[in-house]
Image: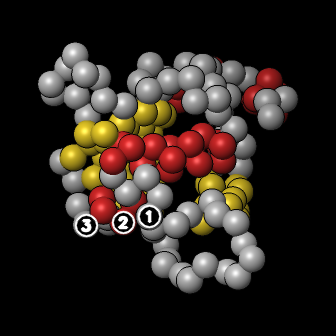
Amino acid sequence: MLRSVEVPLSIPLDRLHLVIQAAMGWSNGHLYEIVAGNLTWGFVDPDNEASRLDAQKARLCDVLGYAKALKYLYDFGDGWEHTITVEDIIDPAPGSLYPRLVEIEGRCPPEDVGGPGGLYAVSRSDYQSFP
């Protein structure tokens, strides 16, 4: 499955997470991480000193210096892992609103299906009925 979205480089990572959720058709019901190099951003647990960096305080343009591609991990139980790549940097189109979904290829797996192994276990005909 492929999703291409256009977002401003200044988008905070917590907002980028919400863009990915919308593009995938997921409900934002689980924790996530965005990884660049050896740094990890996501929800910060105030009771855990070793928790992730705050995704609300980092922008996409800030983290691209750590890695050319970012890893997006969602639903640690299901274990969905995606690669985020910046394909091009363009000037905003006049009159356009961002973020915007520009390309879709394939169906997204349903939430809480049990990860890649659970999805594999779902029969092809059952999977075709998922939105």
Q: Position of residue 84 (x, y in %)?
A: 45, 56
State the residue position of label 1: 10
Q: Pick the residue in front: 9 or 35.
A: 9
* Residue 9 in view: yes
Instruction: Look at label 2 and name its amino acid.
Output: Cys
Q: Is residue 121 left or right of residue 70?
A: right
Q: Earlier in the sequence, mark 1 or mark 2?
A: 1
**Around disc 1, counting alpha carbons within 10 Å, would you say few (fewer than 14), some (14 to 19), or many (20 or more)?**
few
Residue under the image location 31 percent in, 39 percent down: 54
State the residue position of label 2: 61
Instruction: Look at label 1 and name its amino acid.
Output: Ser
Q: Which mark is residue 76?
A: none
Res 112 → quadrant = top right
The reply to whether the C-beta atoms of the residues labelled 1 and 2 are less than 8 Å apart is yes
Q: Is residue 52 left or right of residue 56?
A: left
The reply to whether the C-beta atoms of the residues labelled 1 and 3 are less than 8 Å apart is no
- From mark 1 to mark 2, how far is it between C-alphas? 6 Å
- From mark 2 to mark 3, how far is it between C-alphas? 8 Å
**Around disc 3, counting alpha carbons within 10 Å, would you say few (fewer than 14), some (14 to 19), or many (20 or more)?**
few
| Helix, strand or loop at mark 1 | loop
